[in-house]
Amino acid sequence: MFMAGKTTRMSKVKQLITLNEQGRSIKSIAKILGISRNTVKSYLEKLSVMKIDTENIRSMDDIQAEGLFHSGNPSYKPDKRYEDLMSEMDYYSGELKRKGVTRELLHEEYKSKHPNGYGYSQFCYHLQQRLIASKPTMVLHHEPGDKLMIDFCGDKLSYVDRDTGEIIPCEVFVGSLAASDYCFAMAVPSQKTPDFLHALESCLIALGGVPKSIVSDNLKSAVIKTSKYEPQLNQLMEEFANHYGTTVVPARAFKPRDKALVENQVNNVYRRVFAPLRNQQFFDIASLNESITREVHRHNQTRMQLKEYCREEYFMAEEKHRLAPLPSMRFEIVHYADYKVAQNGHVMLSEDKHYYSVPYKYIGQKVKVAYTRDKVRIYSSSEQVAIHQRGLKKGGYTTEENHLCSAHKHYLERSPDYYMNQARKMSENLYLYVQGIFNQKRHPEQLYRQCDGLLSLARKAGKDVLDKSCSLAMEQQVYSYTIVRNIIENKTYLDKTTACEDGRLPEHANIRGKKQYQ
């Protein structure tokens, strides 16, 4: 019988051989090495049977030597059930791929053929082991600066519209350099081509360079036709790649291992970005992206498992300087449209349902609009007449005051402060009277119109006449454009004593009697 229990280290066995060659007894060898005499005896018996030069044994690695002394129990017999199942495993694994075939069905077939065979759980275990072994994965070595892998997260982040309270969902773009696993993430309104290319461009700018190739998923915004051998890229995607001097390699359809690194990075973004931001509220996409950038930066500075460095350290040391330089100009997608300037001096960009102002002299004329993701440029006869930041709020207006006519400017500038400042320039009484008008609890539009009327009276009747008329109206504590106008027309301001003692103004032709209302 050979040894049972814990196996003796091969370093001790080699010591045992040396001591035996020195002529030591079994008892002394056991005492020196701290093992039993039976163990020493069993190893020496095994050594005599093997008939191998002891010098060769001492020169072997411990693993090789262990194979000589512990080659296995010769009395062991493999399980016949296992041999029977393995001989038919190719059939079962192939049948499982057929539509409607389940593991339960295959096990029933197996048991009908081998009544004493494995139960269902062991059958499924061995079947699963075969399926895993039939799809081995290869460890790829990625050269620094070679590939950037990109994808979108399946879940979305969001922000709240301050004006409407609406929750606006956002797609989250993720990029990962294959060599350093350096991560980039950004929220964009959609996966449409303009937003996708904007996110990709922002990624390249954040990296500070361009990789040799970009490995993308089969996004509609990047790939027109998927193919295992020759996929067709979107024209804008090709133009983008040409602009940045790189190539685009779409992953094979339904082959996530082609971009396994970014798939893993998406999971990291869920844990390192989505989770920390889950209880925070944002009111615009810019503040949302600021927080995403902060969390991704923290993720890139976190030590990786089984490595002594973080993603950022490896990226800065080994990969960044191998990226190609960025071009001097950014890539822009330009769309064109023809519109007629409406009577309100605006054109509506139909894609966004948003209005942009044009100088009022172009009202009624046709203009050309060239718009990118961020800018809207308006041309008349090849001359640029307006440029705006692109707005995405449906039904909203982007207006530049210089584009408005004087009447429209005045309309927008109206406010209590505006009218009181205008009144102060004319007279102190008019200022106090306008102030009294705004103390009334009436709709602002009505008050603005009264103030416009008073300023008009000042131009027609003169500042002195209006000053006296306002003084008389304030004495009677009556604040109304009509009262001041009547005082001026009836020249009541010439003799204040004509005012009635009870506070009423004297009767005249412009005041109706009670009969008019019967």
Image (cartoon, rainbow, N blue to C red):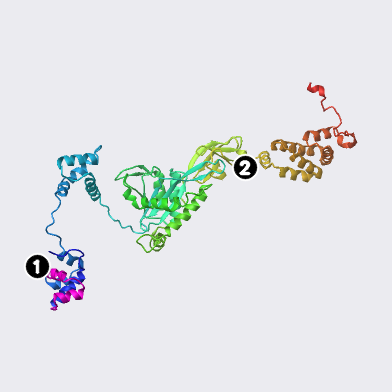
Q: Is residue 243 visible?
A: no
Farthest top residue in view: 518
Q: Is residue 37 magenta?
A: yes
User: In front here: 199 or 515?
Assistant: 515
126 sits to left or right of 337: left
How far from the left and from the top, in percent, is residue 47? 12, 69
Residue 357 or residue 15, whichever sits in front: 15
Q: Position of residue 430 (x, y in %)?
A: 79, 42
Q: Is residue 281 magenta?
A: no
Mark yes or no: residue 342 visible.
Answer: yes
Q: Which residue is mark 2?
A: 403
Q: Amino acid at mark 2?
A: His
Q: Amino acid at mark 1?
A: Val
The magenta region covers 22-50
Contact (Cβ within 8 Å) of mark 1 with mark 2: no
For the residue labelled by badge 2, is the local secondary structure a helix, a strand or a loop?
helix
Residue located at (13% from left, 54% from top): 77
Nearest to the observer: residue 123 or residue 175 = 123
- Residue on which the image places disc 1: 49
Quadrant in which the C terminus is drawn: top right
Q: Is residue 499 above or below residue 255?
A: above
Counting residues from the start of the chain, the first of labels 1 and 2 encountered is: 1
